[in-house]
Image: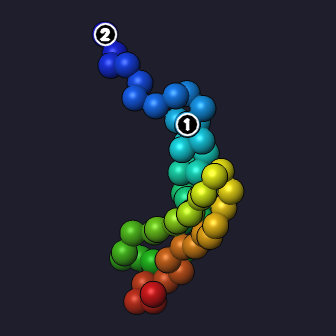
């Protein structure tokens, strides 16, 4: 038996959508040997900001 979801389906789908965007942004970076990082800040389902780690040794 699977545990009951802790969030409504719409909220889960929204989270998955924004996480996918984070992964898209992360692919822009050339950060080896460090991990690639992408970020999206969302408020009321609208993007406030987004970014990614562009290259190793850079902020």
Tell which residue pokes out farthest to the front in this image. Answer: 44
Identify the image quadrant of residue 22.
bottom right
Q: Which residue, given by chain and number where applicable, does mark 2 sit on?
A: 1
CB-based contact (under 8 Å), mark 1 and mark 2: no
Residue 57, above or below 14: below
Q: Nearer the viewer, mark 1 or mark 2?
A: 1
Colour scheme of this structure image?
Answer: rainbow
Kindly identify the residue that appears in the image at 60 percent across and 69 percent down. Answer: 50
User: Observer-nearest residue: 20 or 30?
Assistant: 20
Residue 5, above or below 30: above
Which quadrant, please, contains the C terminus? bottom left
Which quadrant, please, contains the N terminus? top left
Side (left or right) of 44 relative to 7: right
- Residue 30 seen in the current view: no
- Residue 51 seen in the current view: yes
Tell which residue pokes out farthest to the top in this image. Answer: 1
On the image, the x and y values in percent for residue 29 come to 54, 74
Which numbered tag is attached to residue 21?
A: none
Kindly identify the residue that appears in the image at 39 percent across and 69 percent down. Answer: 35
User: Observer-nearest residue: 56 or 7?
Assistant: 7
Say what secondary structure mark 2 lies in: loop
On the image, the x and y values in percent for residue 52 come to 54, 73
On the image, the x and y values in percent for residue 6 come to 40, 29
Kindly identify the residue that appears in the image at 41 percent across and 76 percent down. Answer: 32
Mark 1 burial class by Cα count in 10 Å: few <14, some 14-19, many 20+: few
Residue 23, above or below 5: below
On the image, the x and y values in percent for residue 47 come to 66, 61
Q: Which residue, given by chain and number where applicable, does mark 1 sit on?
A: 11
Kindly identify the residue that appears in the image at 53 percent across and 51 percent down. Answer: 19
């Amino acid at each position: 038996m699977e545990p009951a979801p802790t969030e409504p389906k719409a909220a889960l789908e929204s989270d998955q959508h924004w996480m996918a965007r984070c992964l898209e942004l992360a692919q822009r970076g050339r950060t080896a040997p460090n991990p690639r990082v992408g970020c999206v800040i969302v408020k009321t389902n609208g993007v406030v900001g987004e970014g990614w780690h562009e290259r190793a040794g850079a902020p």
